[in-house]
Image (spheres, rainbow, N blue to C red):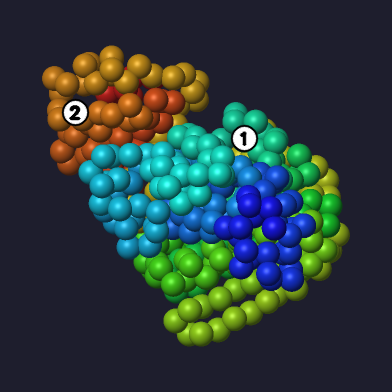
Amino acid sequence: MDPALQRYQKQILFTGIGEAGQQRLLNSSALLVGCGALGSVIADQLVRAGVGKLRLVDRDFVETTNLQRQVLYDEQDVADQLPKAVAAARKLARINSTVQVEPVVADLNRHNVLELMQDVDVVLDGTDNFETRFLVNDAALELGTPWINGGCVGSHGQVMTIIPGTTACFRCLIPSSPQAGATETCDTAGVLAPAVNIVSSLQVIDALKLLTGQADQIESVLTVVDVWDGTWRRLKLGDLSKQSDCPACRHGERAWLRGEAGSQTTVLCGRNAVQVSPADREPLSLDELAERLDPFGSVSANPYLIKFSVPPHEMTVFRDGRAIVKGTEDAAVARSLYAKYIGH
């Protein structure tokens, strides 16, 4: 056996992968959107399995409350105030140095999504909000790139793999964003780590099928699991795009990709926080901003972000101009604080 394949020996022995499949996996690339609960498990499994290149995109930083279920992080990452993408990449490099891991500290949005997706073989969803999923669905349909949706709240979760032109797409199942308060969130229902592990593992299984050239083994289904009740359902979707006259995959509508849908503020699940994203996306000088904010509150900084505390609120400002405003779930309050202290 090729020495480069030795570390994957047990995986190669599995007939579904084999040496040929492993070689294809080593030459493959994946994009992971979100490095939180689902994303950290997905990244860990893909890197151990030997995906050739993994691009990590995440807008957030590591906090103590993440450690209950986000397996790539530890207390030192919290102390260092590291962005999740950076902390994850560092840990993954120690797990498998032969995999090219590219961390991107950014908010996936309509301005960068096509660039971040255009050279990968599959996209995996580790997000916690519908708007990003609709955006990924638009971009995946535009580029013809498969993507694997996953979600987890409380003790239950769901997985759906979308192969453009073959399976139903995300908007076939959910035509538009649910109204606020219409669905459970981790704010209201919490989340159990075993549910996260199962959902993310199911996502990785379909990624392995796609990356080893076995897309024909993937059905158009929605898998729903509840780890507390011990229930498992597979809902066959068939060709929903034709049955539902889907505006996205049947008629080419790209409302999120074109900016016709979506917002510039996002309430972050379970965080009592709001993300504010400036429309112009101009990069900030963190050193200059830290100096300017210093007279008004407590400031700490690293090469990736600034934390600025003005009780009862705390702002974490990233180089791309985004800010996470903690201490409120009111988007208007968050935007007001952003305008007052950041100014654009």
Residue holding disc 2: 299
Image location (x, y in percent) of residue 127: 51, 51
Image location (x, y in percent) of residue 192: 40, 70
Q: Identify the image quadrant of the N terminus.
A: bottom right
Q: Label 1: few (<14), some or many (≥20) within 10 Å?
A: some
Left or right: residue 191 versus residue 38 is left
Q: Amino acid at mark 1?
A: Leu
Q: Quadrant of residue 66?
A: bottom left
Q: Residue at x 28, y 14 (%)?
A: 288
Secondary structure at numbered mark 1? helix
Q: Residue at x 70, y 36 (%)?
A: 119
Image location (x, y in percent) of residue 190: 37, 66
Circle 1 or circle 2, nearest the eye: 1
Image location (x, y in percent) of residue 218: 76, 65
Q: Amino acid at mark 2?
A: Val
**Res. 60 visible in picture:** no
Q: How many marks?
A: 2
Q: Which of these two is toward me, 331 or 342?
A: 342
Q: Residue at x 68, y 64 (%)?
A: 12
Residue holding disc 1: 116
